[in-house]
Each structure stands twice: as C-alpha cells, then as structure tokens.
Image (cartoon, rainbow, N blue to C red):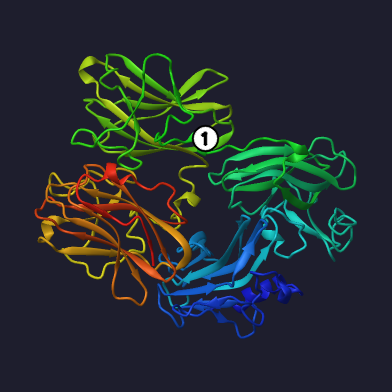
C-alpha cells in the first residue's frame, strides 16, 4: 500500500472545488465520478478516507489488470487531460514492474487507441499531461493498471482532470503547476511567488492573472547564486499531439541587472533550439512576449534564466498561453507529410528525375521467381532503376524528392529490393541535397542485402537549410549491372527512433515483438508459427516478412501437417460498432501444393462462423494485400484459418494485420490479383 506520508504530502492537490470538476475529471473524494471498474477485470478500490483509488498485490496476482472506464465524453475544442498517479514496487524488484496505460475509445472504432503508458516507480505522485485534439466524435477514457512483481506492488490514481486548454498553457494558480517542473539546482531555481509568500525582496506586488497579491506566478531570484554559469530551467509538459501557432506569456525583470532570459524547445532526443531571447528589458510592469511555436513531434518548452553578474536581480513569469493562429497573422504553411511521400501507384507524386536519360522507370510486373511485385499491394507500381533499356557501364539514376523546410527533424522510410548485382556497395544510396549550398551529402547506402526481398530502410536527419532527398542508383561496370527497385517512400516529422513511435499502432499487429492479442485454441505442430526469414521447405513460403524484410510473420509449416488439416488464429475481442469497418492484411501463398486461406467473423453468442474472404491455391511469389469491408454491431472476433494443401510445398503466411474504422478507401482489383480460384465477399452486413 501507499505510504500515508506520501498521501499527506499531496493533499494540497485537492482543491476546494474538487467535487465540481469538468466532465472526464475526478478527485476521488467520495466516489469515482462516473468512472466505473470494468467487471471482467480487477476492481479499482476507493481509499477509505477518499482522496485516491488504487489496486495492489495484497488481493491480486502479478499480471492481473484493473480497468477503469469513463462515461461518454466529447472534446469539440482542444483539451488537456492531466493524470496524477503513482506506481510503487516491492523492494528489490527490478523487473516486471507495474504498468499504467491510458487508452482513448472512439465510438466508431472496434479497438482502443493507446495514448500513454508509464511503468517508472516513484516515491511521490507524478503528473502526466496529454493533449486531446478537438473532434466531433464521442469517446471514452480507459485507464488500465497492470500489476507487476512483488507483494507490495501498487498503482494509485489521485486525480484525473480534463480541461478545455492546451497542456502547455498555465497561469500557475493550481498547486500542481499544470505539470511544469523545475530542473533542480542547489543555488538557482524557479519558485512559486504570490499568495501568502512574503519572504523575499524579489516577490512582486501582484501577479498578472488576477492583478492581486494573492495570485501566483513563477520567479527566479539571484540571492543564492554562487556561480554565474548556473541556470534555472522551468520545463513544460511534453506535447503529445502536433501543434503549431503562437505561444505567448508575460514576464517581468529588473532593468539594468545582469541576467539573461531565454526560451528553448527540446525534442525527445534532447536537442535544444532557442526560439526567443529577451532583448530590451521593457517596462517595470508585466511585458507580453509572443513567439512562433511549432511542435510537429513531441517537444518540451524550457524557460531558462542565467545570471552573468553580481547584480542579477529577478525574472518573473506568468500566464503562458497558446493559440493555433500564428503570431501577428503570419501565414506560414505547415509541412505536409503527404506531399513528401509516394507509393507510385498513380504517378511520381512530387518526385522528379535528372533530365539525362530515362533514369528510374515506373513499372508494374507480374511477380515471378526473378522479380517480385510491388511492396504496396503486390500487384501495383514501383520504381525500377537500371532496366534493360538503360543498363550500361557508368549508369547513374537520380530521383529527387520535394523541397523540405530547414531546421526540422525528419524520419525517412522507404522499401528497396536488389536484383542481379555481384557487389552491392553503392548500388543504391541516399543523399541530402542542400539547395542553398548546392552540396550533396551521403546519409545512407546499401552494404549487403538479401536479393529479391523488399527491405525497409529508416533514416533520421536534420538540416539547417531547405533540402531535398536524392535516391541514386549506380551501375559501375558492364559485368556487374543489376536491377534496383524502390517503393513506398514516406517522410514524417520527428526521429525514427522516438519512443512515441515505438508504441503499437491502434488495431495493428506486425508480429515484430510477439503475436499481439492474437490467440490460438491449441499450440502444437498444426499451429500458426511466428518466424523470420525463409521457411524450411524450398519453393514455398516467403523469403522475408512484409514489414521490414528481416522481421517476423505468422505462417503454417505444411511439412508438420497432413492434407486437409487446419490452423486457426483468432483476433482479440473487437467491440461491435455502428458503421463499416476495414480489415487490411498481407498474405503469402506460394507453392505448387498450396491449400486454402480463409477469414471468418465470429459473433459473440453464436457458434457458427461467417466467411468474409477466401483464397485457394498458389497466388503469387510476392506478398499480396487483402482488404475486407464488413459491419458488425456485436462484439466479435476475426479468425484467420489456413488449411494445408496436397504437398509439403503449401506454406501459407500472413503479416501486418490492421483494423480501421470506416470503409476501405481502396478496394483490391480481384481480377488482377487472383491467379487461382478465389471466393470474395467484398462487403457483408451482420
């Protein structure tokens, strides 16, 4: 259980008006404010004296869950959800710690979206601030506590508060300071001023919010400074949704004193960027500062004060606010990832080539032993360099991407496949072309790669000036010219290795870490297996997975089964919702004796399964995309069933399963895709 002293230290967080909190909020004083424990899991327990709810291992086992679900909510304006929580662990427990997860459940989606997760134990209460973008759709908040190892492991919630504001905003009137934290320094720090505090000559007569001596603000004083190199940092909560606009705040500092006041941003990799610095001291009263602020990926804002002389004085800060409208009506257009990405299904998008020769060719081929289909769907278009029409010694093909704004971090992803080269070095390379300097810098190149397999590459880069991504294919000699294929180029803001990107996509399973929430009724030689690389039997199965080329997929091993035996892979229970749902996945059916792959829908309370989709016999040497559009208003499961064919060359595989709300935006062309017998039910109502 939680220590009573820790609780007493946090009692100040409960405000006088805690029982009159906005919808989606609760102080857990007398009840749970419409947040209900889900019956199928452990219950959250309201502390006897109120103030918090908890779940611990005194009455539960490791791995058990407690789930708390809100009533229907709506956020037609941008909102901030703050969670005051604590995770404690048993002494000596270094692994299998408890975890607290927060999901958003939209009314039209059959799956929950993981918004935030934490597992770090703490001796005190912690604050999580989560931005909720405005939406007209109703939703619910789902809070899941998963107990870890030990007899005294516990998870507690002190307060949930949902307000119509940005999480980066603060007037410092609430005791938890909107989640802002002071980076502790023994000699110089940010302190709370105002209220009844009257112990320092640097405290102002009144704050900016209420124009009152009882209002609160933050300030830094030089009284205790010992070394002029020291700085005080006030750090905002990290943004959790893309935002761009005008950040404003009020500040006050003593004129003519030796101090410096700056504003920085810091991304997930710890990179700082100064976006504002005080110029003229301004008046002795509160001064307004407005700063263009863009957070396309998670960022913190840091207010930093440094003292560089004996007359440091003080700096005060109040009323931080944000507007999605640019400062002084500036109309800077935000970067669009759509304009910088391309799957080449329709054309080259915003990519272009050198005028010298045909260069990269947009092609569509029937997959065979020597050349796979495209990566997007298995039957679409991709780019091919050094084709039979351009193959010649010294051949160079350059493909230029659109111009990218400078001073932003980008994650570049693309898929490539190499055929025929004896030496792979520099058969494909990626350069950054800085427009203002006419300089090209190599940032990636192929060193070694399986031949004929679509491989994923990820590159993080940042340049101060506008630049372009250039893909270059090189054929060095007549005796060593092969083919280079390129497909599905995407550019997103942020680092490819950002922790936020490692969270699983909602309703999606790539099988890279595990089998997600898929289950099997039995596990034996006739089951689905998780595997990477080629399957053991020649002339059947994929050479690699669809996700990265070197990752994992699920498949049946035909040599372990007899003709007609089946294996079923069941999805996690999906909620029934009104409206259409789209299921996409990739399947691989290659081999002379390939059997049958079917997708069924099983509704709760019914023993019979309904057929949604089916493929019979060998389909392609490539991964092919399956699209299923269906409707179901009851809780249900989706079942992937593979049946072994006539021979051991009948391995069947699936990968990259994804459930999405709404109709499928691009239904597959069945006449082009199926080479054998197929039975398809494109849209089914249940």
- Between 41 and 614, the one lying in front of the other is 614
- Please state the total of marks drawn on the protein image: 1
| Residue occupying image coordinates x 31% and y 25% | 427
- Residue identifier under label 1: 339
Q: For mark 1, give the secondary structure.
A: helix
Label 1 Cα neighbours within 10 Å, binned few <14 / some 14-19 / many ≥20: some
> Looking at this view, is 120 or 600 the one in front?
600
Q: Is residue 251 left or right of residue 349?
A: right
Q: Quadrant of residue 139?
A: bottom right
In the figure, 339 relative to 299: above or below? above
Rendered position, 428 above or below 45:
above
Q: Position of residue 385 (x, y in %)?
A: 32, 24
Residue 123 visible (yes or no): no
Quarter of the image with the C terminus in it = bottom left
| Above-or-below relation of 295 to 385 | below
Residue shown at the point (58%, 37%) measured from the top left: 335
In the image, residue 55 lies at what x, y percent? 51, 77
Left or right relative to 610: residue 68? right
Q: Is residue 213 left or right of residue 13?
A: right
Find residue 680 and report its image quarter. bottom left
Residue at 59% of width from left, 73% of height from top? 71
Q: Quadrant of residue 633?
A: bottom left
Residue 346 appears in view: yes
Q: Find residue 53 and report its horizontal and vertical position in percent.
A: 58, 77
Q: Is residue 606 left or right of residue 98?
A: left
Position of residue 390 measured from the top left corner of the image (x, y, whole percent) = 30, 17
Toward the bottom, the furthest residue is 48
């Amino acid at each position: 259980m939680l220590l009573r002293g820790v609780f007493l230290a946090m009692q100040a967080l409960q405000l006088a008006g805690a029982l009159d909190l906005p919808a989606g909020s609760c102080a857990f004083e007398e009840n749970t404010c419409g947040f209900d424990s889900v019956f199928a899991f452990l219950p959250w327990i309201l502390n006897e004296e109120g103030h918090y709810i908890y779940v611990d291992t005194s009455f539960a086992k490791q791995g058990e869950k407690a789930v708390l679900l809100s009533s229907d909510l709506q956020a037609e304006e941008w909102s901030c959800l703050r969670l005051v929580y604590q995770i404690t662990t048993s002494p000596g427990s270094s692994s299998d710690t408890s975890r607290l997860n927060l999901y958003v459940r939209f009314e039209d989606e059959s799956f929950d979206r993981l918004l935030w997760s934490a597992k770090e134990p703490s001796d005190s209460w912690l604050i999580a601030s989560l931005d909720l973008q405005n939406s007209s759709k109703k939703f619910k908040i789902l809070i899941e506590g998963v107990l870890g190892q030990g007899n005294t492991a516990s998870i507690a919630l002190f307060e949930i508060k949902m307000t119509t504001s940005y999480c980066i905003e603060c007037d410092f009137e609430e005791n938890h300071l909107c989640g802002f934290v002071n980076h502790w320094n023994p000699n110089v720090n940010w302190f709370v001023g105002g209220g009844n505090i009257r112990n320092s000559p640097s405290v102002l007569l009144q704050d900016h919010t209420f124009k009152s001596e009882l209002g609160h603000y933050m300030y830094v004083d030089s009284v205790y400074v010992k070394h002029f190199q020291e700085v005080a940092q006030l750090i905002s909560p990290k943004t959790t949704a893309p935002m761009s606009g005008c950040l404003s705040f009020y500040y006050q500092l003593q004129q003519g004193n030796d101090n410096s006041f700056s504003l920085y941003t810091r991304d997930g990799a710890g990179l700082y960027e100064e976006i504002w610095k005080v110029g003229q001291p301004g008046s002795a009263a509160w001064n307004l500062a407005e700063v263009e602020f863009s957070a396309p990926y998670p960022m913190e804002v840091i207010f930093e004060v440094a003292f560089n002389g004996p007359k440091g004085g003080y700096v005060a800060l109040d009323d931080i606010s944000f507007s999605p409208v640019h400062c002084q009506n500036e109309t800077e257009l935000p970067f669009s990832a759509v304009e910088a990405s391309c799957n080449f299904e329709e054309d080259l998008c915003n990519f272009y080539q050198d005028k010298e020769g045909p260069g990269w060719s947009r092609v569509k081929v029937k997959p065979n032993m020597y050349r796979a289909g495209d990566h997007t769907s298995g039957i679409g278009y991709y780019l091919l360099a050094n084709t039979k029409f351009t193959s010649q010694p010294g051949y160079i093909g350059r493909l230029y991407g659109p111009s990218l704004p400078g001073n932003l971090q980008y994650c570049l992803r693309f898929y490539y496949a190499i055929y025929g080269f004896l030496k792979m070095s520099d058969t494909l390379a990626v350069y950054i072309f800085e427009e203002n300097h006419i300089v090209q810098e190599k940032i990636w190149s192929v060193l070694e790669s399986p031949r004929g397999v679509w491989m994923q590459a990820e590159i993080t880069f940042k340049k101060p000036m506008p630049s372009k991504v250039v893909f270059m294919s090189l054929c060095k000699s007549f005796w060593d010219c092969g083919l280079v294929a390129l497909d599905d180029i995407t550019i997103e803001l942020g680092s490819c290795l950002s922790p936020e990107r490692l969270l699983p996509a909602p309703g999606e399973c790539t099988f890279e870490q595990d089998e997600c929430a898929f289950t099997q009724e039995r596990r034996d030689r006739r089951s689905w297996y998780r595997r990477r690389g080629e399957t053991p039997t020649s002339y059947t199965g994929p050479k690699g997975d669809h996700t990265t080329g070197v990752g994992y997929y699920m498949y049946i091993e035909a040599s372990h089964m007899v003709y007609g035996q089946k294996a079923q892979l069941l999805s996690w229970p999906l909620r029934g919702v009104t409206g259409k749902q789209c299921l996409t996945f990739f399947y691989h059916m290659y081999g002379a004796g390939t059997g049958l792959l079917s997708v069924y829908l099983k509704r709760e309370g019914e023993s019979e399964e309904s057929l949604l989709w089916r493929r019979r016999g060998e389909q392609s040497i490539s991964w092919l995309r399956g699209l299923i559009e269906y409707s179901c208003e009851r809780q249900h499961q989706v079942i992937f069933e593979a049946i072994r064919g006539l021979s051991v060359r009948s391995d069947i595989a699936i990968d990259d399963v994804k459930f999405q709300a709404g109709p499928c935006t691009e239904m597959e062309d069945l006449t082009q895709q199926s080479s054998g017998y197929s039975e398809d039910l494109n849209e089914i109502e249940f």
